[in-house]
Structures are given as C-alpha cells and as structure tokens.
Image: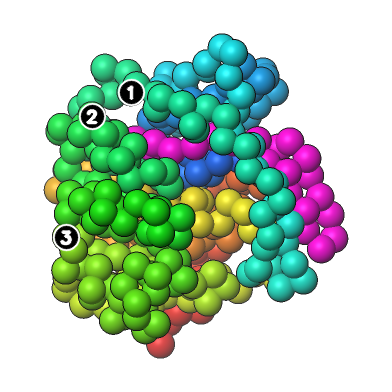
Amino acid sequence: MSLIVTGTIGIDTVHTPTDKREQVLGGSCTYFAAAASFFTQVRLVAVVGDDFHADYQAVFKKFPNVDVDGLEVRKGSKTFRWGGKYLEDMNERETLFTELGVVAEKPPTPPAKYADSKFVFLANSHPSVQMAMLESFPKRAIAVADTMNLWIDIARGELLSLLSKVDGLVLNDQESRMLTGKRNPFTAGKMILDLGPTFVVIKKGEHGCVLVHRDGVAALPAYPCEQVVDPTGAGDSFAGGMMGHLAAAHSKDQDIGMPAVQQALAHGTIIASFAIESFSLDRLARLTREEMAKRYTEFQAVVRV
C-alpha cells in the first residue's frame, strides 16, 4: 500500500557529551522514510539544494524500499542545515544553528504518479505547507501529521485547520501542553481529539508514549536501551515505524482502530531504539529483519503483564 511522507531533508551537525558528527544526513523525511521502509515502500517528497552531494543521495540507496522520485534538487539553493548539542541528560539539547535554505522557498511539488497515495504522513513543517501537501493526495485513506512548538506558537490557526482534516497527530508532551494548556497527557490528548483527529500519540522520550484514541487510552514504555549515541532521529524513526506498519498490515481495510495503532506503536518503538544507537542513519542502514524480530520479542516480554 502506498505510503508517502513529506517534510524536510537536512544536513546535521550533532554534538553529544562524548562525540560529535558534522554534516551528516538528517531531517524528518530522512529518518521517517528509512524506518518505514522496513515494512513497506515509501514515497518521499522533499527538496534539497545543489550542495546535497552524491554521498548524501547514495545513503537512500541503502534503503531500496524508499522511492526518491519526489526528491527535488534545486539549483542555486542550499539544503536545510541544523546543528545541535545534547547535554549530559540527553533528553535536553541546545540548538546551535538553523539555516533554512530551501525550506524558506517554495515547497516541492509531488510527482503526479504519487497522487494515488493512500497513507500520508505530514512530517514537521509549517501547517500551511502541510495542508497544501495534504490536498495533493485526494485518494488518501489515512493522514497523520507531526508538529512542533514553533508552529503552535506562531501558526496556531493554520495548525487547528490542519487538525480538522487529519486522522492522527504525533507530538511530544511539551508540545501537547503548549497546544492545550494541560499538563496531563491524557487530558491534553482528549482535548486534541475534539479538534478532529481519531487518535493522538504523545511522545515522552525515554518514558515511551501515550496513545489517546476515540476508543480509549493506552501507554507504551520505550525499549530499555543501555546506550544512546544520538537521539536526533528517534521521533521521526518512531513515526516511520508506526506508519510503515499501519500501511503494511492494514493495506486493504485502512484500519486505524485502537488495537491497530497500539501494535503499530510497538513497531515504531523498536525501530526508534535502533536509530539512536548511531549517528544519522548508520544503524538503520545495517539493521536486519532478524534483529528487529528479536528485539520485538524482547519488548513483548517487557510489556507483558
């Protein structure tokens, strides 16, 4: 079943308490597509500058289920760049710089052949851009969006309009508090459902996530990782695993009932646990399905009651 992701591809500089990497491949589209590709084919829509050299493009070839026909390389422009520094508590980070580059320009146009996409994920970008992208896929069956505190602050009206059109929303606990004014994630999630979505996933970092669905609520822990190298792509990999599993397991019935979403979240949790074991996509690029299956079995034992 056709899964499409729209968002950013970036070049990251990441500092952690023990190491650093400069000018590595990053961005919401990048991590999402790599993670989702373990479950289904993923169509990617994004734009980069002509500084996005062949080494970056070659990384996508390590994920054969990622269709990059929707990747536009814009001459005379620069790729989005971000730099961050993680503190000793790696749940906290400082942004060192942000260079918008092509993100500040006209959004990419999805290829005509992508118009039949059924599963749509709108990775983090301005809500007006997300809305325009959403309207590019008239045959969509399930649409899920991500957002961030910046858009909640400066584009709340556009975000609320978007939420009335999507089936699901993914955001972190700080963002859910900012959007609703409620500290309790279950209360915040229920308020967000009143805005339109069928379900809301509230990420809580190393403490897992909360699912608030029209059919009920649930909580899922994170996989107990002993070593975290770089958490930059955790959230986007988590979303990729979730959507990839939904698209693969429910391609015919487009089921987004609570059990289907809960199972998808478990698979997203496993993918994210691998993504944080390296910088950029290094760990996902060498991940095997056998490793995924083994860790999923281990995770089932962790959450069993």
Q: Is residue 67 left or right of residue 290?
A: left
Task: Name the residue located 15 percent from the left edge and 32 percent from the top edge.
Answer: 138
Q: Secondary structure at mark 2?
A: loop
Q: Which mark is residue 196?
A: 3
Residue 167, x across and y down, in percent: 21, 54
- The earlier-in-sequence mark between 2 and 3 is 2
Helix, strand, or loop for circle 3? loop
- Give how far apart the Cα atoms at labels 1 and 2 are: 7 Å
Q: Are marks 3 and 1 in contact (CB under 8 Å)?
A: no
Q: Which residues are magenta?
A: 1-25
**Residue nearest the viewer, comparing 118 with 129:** 129
Q: Name the residue nearer the viewer: 285 or 96.
A: 96
Asked if residue 62 is among those painted magenta in the image, a careful observer would answer no
- The image quadrant where one finds the C terminus is bottom left
Quadrant housing residue 180? bottom left
Q: Are marks 1 and 2 in contact (CB under 8 Å)?
A: yes
Residue 4 counted in the magenta span: yes
Q: Describe the element under mark 1 as helix, strand or loop.
A: loop
Which kind of residue does numbered mark 3 sit on? Gly
Q: Residue at x 16, y 73 (%)?
A: 215
What secondary structure do most residues of the magenta stretch adopt? strand
- Looking at the image, which residue sits at the far front? 154
Judge whether residue 152 can be spotted in this image: yes
Q: Position of residue 126 (x, y in %)?
A: 39, 43
Q: Which residue is mark 2?
A: 136
The image shows residue 88, relative to residue 42, as above or below, that is: below
Residue identified by numbered label 1? 110
